[in-house]
Amino acid sequence: TQLLEQSPQFLSIQEGENLTVYCNSSSVFSSLQWYRQEPGEGPVLLVTVVTGGEVKKLKRLTFQFGDARKDSSLHITAAQTGDTGLYLCAGAGGGATNKLIFGTGTLLAVQP
Amino acid sequence: EPEVTQTPSHQVTQMGQEVILRCVPISNHLYFYWYRQILGQKVEFLVSFYNNEISEKSEIFDDQFSVERPDGSNFTLKIRSTKLEDSAMYFCASSRPYKETFFGQGTRLTVV
């Protein structure tokens, strides 16, 4: 069974601080997607990483896929209150059917 | 920007009743999915659908569940004889082959 563990589960920081969220597995994934979810809403796609070692930047967010494609990280620089939310990583096993295995989630609260 | 739309946003049903959750996937997508998220838990894969048939399903997706694409735009999830433990957010999603998955805003199902 493929599992994705995220750490930390909860993170409360002050505006302007930096943070990193980790997504780890013992399984290899063909790609990994990061989503953000607001309460009562569906996951919203942030980025997809496909190649081992790949780094993608989305404004103040930096995503990295591990060399072995088993883990990923999300780094936020100078967090803002608008970054508050639940961050989910989701791994795809491969094939045309993009079935996703979701991580346990990291709930981020950015205080003003 | 194209999006996955789901109706209704909230459905309350009595235990033992049948419910149908509806979705309109993104128009040029070929793979359709249903996921479930029980309150406080992670998002779980239920089923994927391609070319008018189920391509993969999880252990959760038992005989109580069925999916259908009744016409060229809609994709439905039917739950027969609902149970209390079926209460959850249900997300429809769609993707193109080998591409990232986009989610709808969800239907909150409450079984009383």
Image: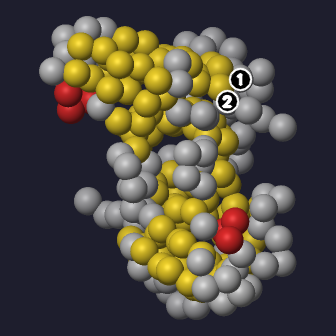
Kind of residue at badge 2:
Leu
Above or below, B28 relative to A18: below
Of A52 and B54, nearer the camera is B54
Quarter of the image for residue B80 reads bottom right
Is the C-beta separation of discs 1 and 2 under 8 Å?
Answer: yes
Of A62 and B111, nearer the camera is B111
> Which residue is rendered at x = 42% and y = 79% of the image?
B8
Placement of the C terminus of chain A among the 4 image quadrants: top left
Residue B40, visible in the rendered structure: yes
Give the mark, 1 or 2, whose residue is nearer the N terminus: 2
> Which residue is rendered at x = 84% and y = 37% of the image?
A1
Kind of residue at badge 1:
Ser
The extreme left residue here reads A112
> Which residue is rendered at x = 52% and y = 62% of the image?
B89
Left-right relation of B42 to B56: left
Above or below, B57 relative to A10: below
Task: Determine the CA span between mark 1 and mark 2.
Answer: 5 Å
Question: Which SS class for mark 1?
Answer: loop
Q: Which residue is mark 1?
A: A25
Q: Which residue is mark 2?
A: A4
Left-right relation of B34 to A59: right
Tell me, what colour scheme is on the image?
Answer: secondary structure
How many other residues sit within 10 Å of disc 1, few (<14), some (14-19) or many (≥20)?
some
Above or below, A95 relative to B107: above
Q: How many labels, in total?
A: 2
